[in-house]
Image: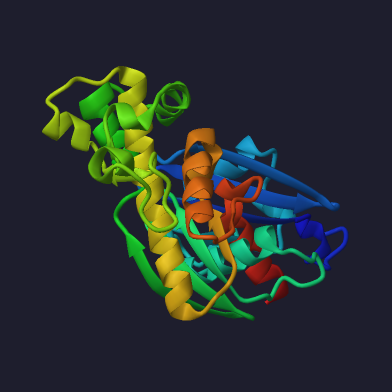
Amino acid sequence: MDITTESAIPGRALAAIDFGISNTDAVSLIDGTVYRWTRPTDGVPNDEVVHSVLAEGGLSLTVLPHLAVTGGRHRVLPERINSIPLRAVNEVTAIGRGGQTLGALDESNTTAPMLVVSAGSGTAVVAARGREYSHITGTGVGGGTLQGLGRLLLGTTNASAIDALAQTGNANGADLSIGDVISGKLGTLPPDATAVNFGRLAHLAQDASQPDLAAALMTLVGQVIAITAINAARAERLTRIVVIGHMTDMPSFRAVVERVGAYYSTEITLPLHAGFGTAIGAMLHEANG
């Protein structure tokens, strides 16, 4: 979705910063144009960090009526910097609002009920109904899991490198498939669907290639997030699922999530620029209420 259609403040510069565990994401809306930029999170946010992040996007606090901040330890920031208000936005609200905006089927309706999944270092699941947002569940499995196990299994914490390897590998080189276990399909699951993550390494005592290990690792992370989302959506009786967060930057992750959705006849939307969903949600919440 084009977020300019939701923000009815022509000629006014808006911005937000999401201080995540791994990434600090920033967005701005200037004269109808959306800008997005990111950098690794380094330490606790303070006045200097705020100025530095904005400068990377060619912005100064002096051109802003206020700055929306969310994520991580944004609450340690002062209420004002150089007389400009810093408006703290609860992460649950920012996630829900950002997911509604990026996942809207109709650009005139960004209040549609949906389940918003923020897949970052960990994973948070938020129910969005109108402008009411509530944290439903989550999982500690996410990008941090990918990087931590990537270091142990592949010798790297670089998510892009793991993703590139995963795209060339076969997860069933390390996993046991349903076909391996019961010699057929199981319900709606095809024979090549995962039965036991990394089970081939445990039960058949055989090694796997680096690409296969990467594919199995991405499959593990993606499956946990997708199944968590599907179960939460069913429990909350929400028919739409939207995934935001920087895990969606990786094609191999998107493929796993879409495959799990297909297994359970559930459409899972992974919008463009979804890594900036929380920052977008914070900016729009403070701009429009």
The residue under the point 38% across, 40% down is 219
The residue under the point 64% across, 70% down is 285
Going by the image, does 38 lie left or right of 65? left
Q: Nearer the viewer, residue 128 or 21?
A: 128
Q: Is residue 193 visible?
A: yes
Query: What colour scheme governs how the chains and residues are painted in the rendered image of this protein?
Result: rainbow
Going by the image, does 33 lie left or right of 18? right
Going by the image, does 242 lie left or right of 144? right
Choose top left, top right, bottom left or bottom right for residue 289: bottom right
The residue under the point 25% across, 27% down is 151
Q: Is residue 81 visible?
A: no
Residue 199 lies, in percent from the top left, at 20, 37
Residue 242 lies, in percent from the top left, at 57, 60
Q: Nearer the viewer, residue 16 or 181?
A: 181
Q: On the rendered image, what quadrant is the N terminus found in?
A: bottom right
Specify the farthest residue to the front. 183
Residue 62 lies, in percent from the top left, at 70, 53
Q: Establish if 151 lies above or below 102.
A: above
Residue 203 lies, in percent from the top left, at 12, 34
